[in-house]
Image (cartoon, helix red, strand yellow):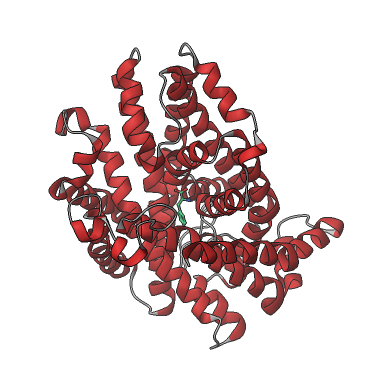
Amino acid sequence: MATETSKRGIWNSRIGFVFAAAGSAVGLGNIWRFPYVTGESGGGAFVIIYLICVALICVPYLFAELSLGRHHQRNPVGAIKAITGPSGWLLVGGLCVVAGMMILSYYSVVAGWAIGYVAKDVIAPHTSFEEFIASPGMVITLLALFLGLTLYVVIGGVQQGIERWAKVLMPMLVVLMFVVIIRSVTLEGAAEGISFYLYPDFSEVGFQTIMVALGQAFFSLSLGMGTMITYGSYLPKRENILNSGGYVAVFDTSIAILAGFMIFPAIFALGFDPAHGPALVFVILPEVFAEMPLGGLVGVLFFLLLSIGALTSSISLLEVVVAYFIDEKKWSRKKSVLTIGILAFILAIPSALSQGATGFLSDMSYLFGEEGLFGQNDFLSILDFFFGSLFLAVGAFFISIFVGWVWGAHYAAEEIQQGSSFGGTLMKVWIFMLRYICPAFIFIVIMGMLFDII
Ligand code: PHE
């Protein structure tokens, strides 16, 4: 069994990697973002387009990140440098590290709300969601608590921190999720929600739907910013990238789909509107819980699982930045984690104050006009658009070009072949997808996003 003998970490077991990478993928993206985006984008038809994006674009691209990471066993910047030497491509690695930092900042704010909601009946029983997220003391304390937990796990290292905790937290999340789903689908009137969710109505689908679906798929699978390069770099050569990556994709997608079963039946059963935007799980669900038998308990469980999912994801966001400082700047793990943790906390404060606490951060129409970006005008949502959608697509575009053309798809395929039987036709199809289909499709989506901003 591999141990952490070298200075870099290494996963102890395949299952450890799968849990950690699935933990990175499953998070607020699946349980908070996926349901509200599905609710806003018309239900079943969106789900089908999402699944197509995952299968055709994200899965082939996921193998590119994993192979690049494992080949040179480096963080995103180091992996690229090992191939090209000093070159403009290093900027792409740099973009990954910056995106990791920025996503970590606002992600921790939302995760802080989730932790707060676990104990909301105790800490702020009569406060509405709007008041809750607008009270600076509350959100900043919760943010600090959440970031503190993230730092604690990451300081422990790859095996003793990330892998060990992922193996405990992920099964907990799945069990809690099934408890909430059973409650939700057995409510009277749940069938209408299930049919909204499953019945595809393509009449409302447009290019915007495809754009949102691909952005969501990248975010949900933690792609486009080097998480899978970094996690792949801790994979021993004998491991099967194809199987392990496949499990992660299937697991993440299943959890997103299950999150819908947790939420839509309950929303329809109690007569609420599914198109409620980012507040969906925080505003509507507590009302839903309040009206159902055993609702108090289900509510606590739900927000607990949301917090757990968020924690295993924020760990991976932090790890990308930490791995860069450990590999490239030769910092110790402890120094990297503490320095970056403090910086992330400072960077998160504007997002924490952008939900009503401070006027000029909560409504940035002076910069983005009355319409905002995709209808949102607060600092947190603006960061989420730039770093959680646009930059992920840009990162994925350049990384797929890099692996497909600059490093060379054949080398990547050779890397994947070590430890797996990846041969013949399958390999040819993959190379074609990586070199042509992924970059072309992602490019069109990026153009669409840019058009939307202008
Ligand atoms: N995939 C995570 C989620 O669904 C978020 C994330 C994005 C994590 C990018 C790492 C990198 O919540």
Give x and y (percent) for residue 133: 23, 44
Please, which residue is most extreme toward the front here?
370
**Observer-nearest of 167 and 77:** 77
Is residue 346 left or right of 13 when viewed as pictured? left
Is residue 402 left or right of 353 when viewed as pictured? right
Residue at left offset 45%, top offset 50%: 163
Residue 254 falls in which quadrant of the image?
top right
Instruction: Evaluate whether residue 311 shows in this view.
Output: yes
Residue 352 falls in which quadrant of the image?
bottom left
Give x and y (percent) for residue 83: 61, 81
**Against 249, is 452 above or below?**
below
Give x and y (percent) for residue 135: 16, 46
Residue at left offset 40%, top offset 36%: 276
Please, which residue is most extreme toward the left here?
137
Instruction: Evaluate whether residue 226 shows in this view.
Output: no
**Against 184, is 405 above or below?**
below
Q: How many marks?
A: 0
Residue at left offset 27%, top offset 64%: 347
**Against 218, is 322 above or below?**
below
**Observer-nearest of 374 and 134:** 374
